[in-house]
Image (cartoon, rainbow, N blue to C red):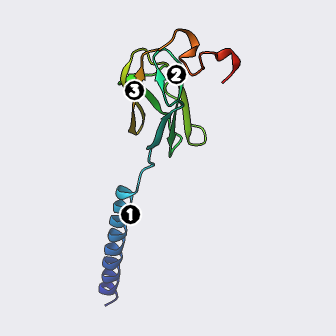
């Protein structure tokens, strides 16, 4: 009688351990991974002109390195490690027209920017008034 009781207990323990292991595997397989998602992208100017330097800032929900692109081409200085959820890179558009700026950190975030032809020569087009030496 003792032998059959021990087998019955061992069988129950084996079923319980198997069920526990199956639940642990299911939990491990469905556990969420760390997200790496950009949450915003902006340029520091309302009017963007060809040949001028701008700051492109992206916000992120993780610390992973982020890449910046202009029309699918890597912007020099990429990748950048975000600090306090943000990364900023300098960008100089070299052609007029619509540019698709994007940042990639696991997934991508895009921003369409219309780049204008310069209206004046020199720094006056790049954000200064025609009398830029007087301050803005």
**Around disc 3, counting alpha carbons within 10 Å, would you say few (fewer than 14), some (14 to 19), or many (20 or more)?**
some
* SS at badge 3: strand
Dot 1 or dot 3: first in sequence order is: 1
Circle nearer the viewer, 1 or 3:
3
**Around disc 2, counting alpha carbons within 10 Å, would you say few (fewer than 14), some (14 to 19), or many (20 or more)?**
few
Which of these two is toward me, 75 or 47? 47
* SS at badge 2: loop
Residue 81 can be seen in this image: no
Q: Is residue 114 above or below residue 119?
A: below
Q: Quadrant of residue 114?
A: top left
> What residue is at 45 percent from the left and 30 percent from the top?
67
Return the residue at label 1.
24
* SS at badge 1: helix
Which of these two is toward me, 77 or 91? 91
Return the residue at label 3.
114
Percent coordinates x, y for residue 98 in the rendering: 35, 25
Compute the Cα span from label 2 to label 1: 43 Å
> What residue is at 31 percent from the left and 74 percent from the top?
15
Compute the Cα span from label 3 to label 2: 22 Å
Percent coordinates x, y for residue 38 in the rendering: 45, 41
Quadrant in which the N terminus appears: bottom left
Q: Quadrant of residue 128?
A: top right
Q: Residue furthest bottom?
A: 1
Left or right, 115 with respect to 55, comes to left
Q: Is residue 30 above or below residue 16?
A: above
Return the residue at label 2.
77
């Amino acid at each position: 009688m003792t032998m059959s009781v021990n087998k019955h207990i061992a069988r129950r323990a084996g079923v319980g351990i198997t069920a526990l292991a199956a639940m642990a595997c299911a939990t491990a397989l469905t556990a969420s991974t760390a997200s790496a998602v950009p949450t915003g992208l902006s340029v520091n100017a309302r009017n963007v002109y060809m040949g001028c330097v701008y700051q492109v800032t992206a916000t992120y929900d993780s610390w992973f390195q982020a890449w910046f692109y202009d029309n699918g081409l890597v912007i020099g200085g990429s990748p950048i490690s975000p600090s306090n959820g943000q990364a900023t890179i300098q960008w100089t558009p070299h052609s007029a027209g619509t540019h698709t700026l994007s940042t990639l950190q696991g997934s991508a975030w895009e921003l369409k920017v219309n780049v204008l032809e310069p209206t004046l020569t020199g720094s006056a087009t790049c954000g200064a008034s025609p009398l830029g030496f007087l301050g803005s």
